[in-house]
Image (cartoon, coloured by chain):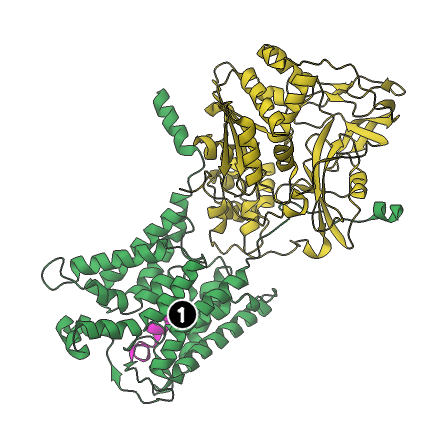
Chain colours: A yellow, B green
Amino acid sequence: MGLATFKGGIHPPDKKIFSANSPIAASKPPKIAVIPLSQHIGAPCNAIVTIGQEVKKGEVVGEPAGFVSSPVHASVSGKVVAIGEFPNAMGRMVNSVVIENDGKEEWTALKDNPDYMSLPPEALKEKVKAAGIVGMGGAAFPTVVKLSPPKEKQIDAVLINGAECEPYLTADYRLMVERPKEVIEGLKILMKILGVQKGYVGIENNKPDAVAKMKEAASGSGIEVLALEVKYPQGAEKMLIKAILGREVPPRALPMDVGVVVQNVGTALAIYEAARFGKPLIERVVTVTGEGIAEPKNLMVRIGTKISDLIEECGGFKDGVGKVISGGPMMGFALSSLEVAVTKGTSGILVIPEEKVFHADEFGPCIRCGRCIDACAMGLMPSMLSVLSERGFYEEAKEYNLFDCFECGSCTYVCPSKRPIVQFVRLAKSMVKP
Amino acid sequence: MEATKKDQQFIVSVSPHVRSDETTSRIMWTVSLALLPALLSGVWFFGLKALFITASCIISSIIFEHLYMKIVDKKSVVSDGSAFLTGLLLGMNMPASLWSFSPFTAHVPVVASFFAIVITKQLFGGLGFNVFNPALIGRAFALISWPKAMTIWTEPTAALLSMDAKTTATPLGILKEEGVTKLLEVFGDKMSLYTHLLIGNRAGSLGEVSAIAILIGGLFLLAKRYITWHIPVSFLGTAALMAWVLGGKGALFTGDPIVHLLSGGMMLGAWFMATDYVTSPSVKNGQIIFGIGCGALTMLIRLKGGFPEGVMFAILIMNCFAPLIDRSFKSKVFGAVKQTKAKEIKQ
């Protein structure tokens, strides 16, 4: 029997070798931290500091403005020098708090809890909320919302997503190798909050040492650590649940509808730190990698650090850089400027040299080879979606389950005609209502 | 240094940022390569005239494709190999005797190529939009227009320069007209018949005769994952079953499936014509239905119809259904079945 997995998917070269062996190193704290008030899915925060105010590390600078929202904290100590619109990595203008670092690294008062596991679930949940923790795999969905399922949804399993199926990225891998105990503790806290007995960690089998380390850390706890087949998009929530538990999340439903909550490795660590030390989410691991960077590294980076600073810290670009991507090559987005800040959802910075950039300015007709259908993890017909969208038949695309596509890009990766299938899907989605 | 870095321009485009190295033209050229053993066996058995016919189909197909694109003012895409492949398949579906048949019939490949490329493919929207397999329509057109020239079969001579081969009937023709006893008489015994059919030492279209050469190409495509087992296996399986059940004289379950599988265009059709991406369903379940339809129609025509051979018409008829099959099967959306089950349980 093979390793657990799902149907469909693709095998892009994993390219993790660039940064896999570089231990997580602390990045230089930024001189100026630009902290966006919207780093998560949901309502942007309201700034609660004023220009000129002195703030300490870990102090709240933005309060959540609704249930689906998450507070943001100062990642350095210093003076607020500006509050206003700054471009984020997607190029949108986002209200941000700018702090000038005084270099003192003074923490705000944090509440230490050596005995955190004896706290009641509600108190632990409150700590997760106060720490501003969001999904750190990239989507940045407020974690506390996932931990507050409606009463009728009975949760019975918590999954930690250690698949890290995007090529190049190694941030979660390094965390699992270097800090497995803390990740497992994070999972235990999640299980306690949700009142769940079953905990799992799913890791793609191209990281055998991570599997071994996590197994060791989990031994005796009842938590299962599973090696999964190496296949993109193994780390998509629905695919991970299918691989580990054999459950299929119905179309348009959420993991909680099949009794599951999925959290990323980095998120689990942040939850542990929030429960144990009361530490808010002000830093995260960012993999800076790719053929176009001088010294690929895994860095522990303060939120608000400019991407240009990270590039510099990794020895700068090699000659002829073409593309800089925030995230992985499959679902990340290309940056137009490096003068944007790292946020809670920034899992990696990928630098691709010009000669390796794929140019998609020309594509051919669909030859109906069916490769995209085989690759689609959701069982869709991307070929039909792209043809219908190309011709403007957006309503008809809905009959082919347009809105079940989560835009993983597998179809586009395999297409021999190099059709921008995902982009056609995005276009159709924007033209019709679900 | 700092300033230049900040001024640097980056390429911005949408995800995914990496692509596989598979391309349409690589697929077309690889399929053409997979046809090489079958073509070479045709040249071996029927001489260089087999090569001349195939070459004239390929050259005319490429020229028509190029001219059409020029006329409609589109970028010529001859290099994608699709016109080459159509010409190659068309040529392999013609009798080698076409070259030496008198009166002069060298125009047949040219006109058939025109019909395949311009009428069947380009007028329907070009690559990816044709309903019917272009090579098969080209052949069907030639067969209807020049029924005599397209059905003069010659004995394999296994001499490169042979020009005056004896005319003879194809194994399927003998089977249809005179029955299995005569067929065995012609080829000696059963084993000898099977061997002749397997290696291709028999009359027939120049590229269809050697079952083993076609199989080598087909298995190569299978190994390279350019095709899957679904269409060939369901096609050949259905045909074999029907030949066994209905192919006997008088009694059921006495037919000889092996003769039917190895003769006519069965192998070439199942491995290379029915598996054409554009004109077959893209959903796997649909491909099985498609293959079953092709196999059943082929045998129906062979056993009950007026023609000795039915592969071409069977595939063309099933081509019509390919879009419909895709539509009705679609593919199963992840989690969808469980949802309906869950609803049923709730009710």
Q: Where B282 falls versus B116 (above or below)?
A: above
Residue type, label 1: Gly
The magenta segment: B136-152
A270 relative position to B101: left or right: right
* Residue occupying image coordinates x 43% and y 51%: B282
Q: Where A246 falls versus B187 (above or below)?
A: above
* Residue occupying image coordinates x 47% and y 32%: A244
Find residue A353 and report its horizontal and vertical position in percent. Answer: 72, 53
Find residue B149 and report its horizontal and vertical position in percent. Answer: 32, 80
Q: Where A337 falls versus B292 (above or below)?
A: above
Is residue B101 within the magenta segment?
no
Which quadrant of the rendered structure holds the N terminus of chain A?
A: top left
Magenta segment's dominant SS is helix
The chain containing the residue under callout 1 comes to: B
Image quadrant assignment for residue A303 = top right
How would you rate the neighbour count of disc 1 (Cα within 10 Å): few for under 14, some for 14-19, many for 20 or more? many
Find residue A167 and report its horizontal and vertical position in percent. Answer: 61, 44
Image quadrant assignment for residue A140 = top right
- Taking depth in this image into account, of A321 and B273 the one nearest to the observer is A321
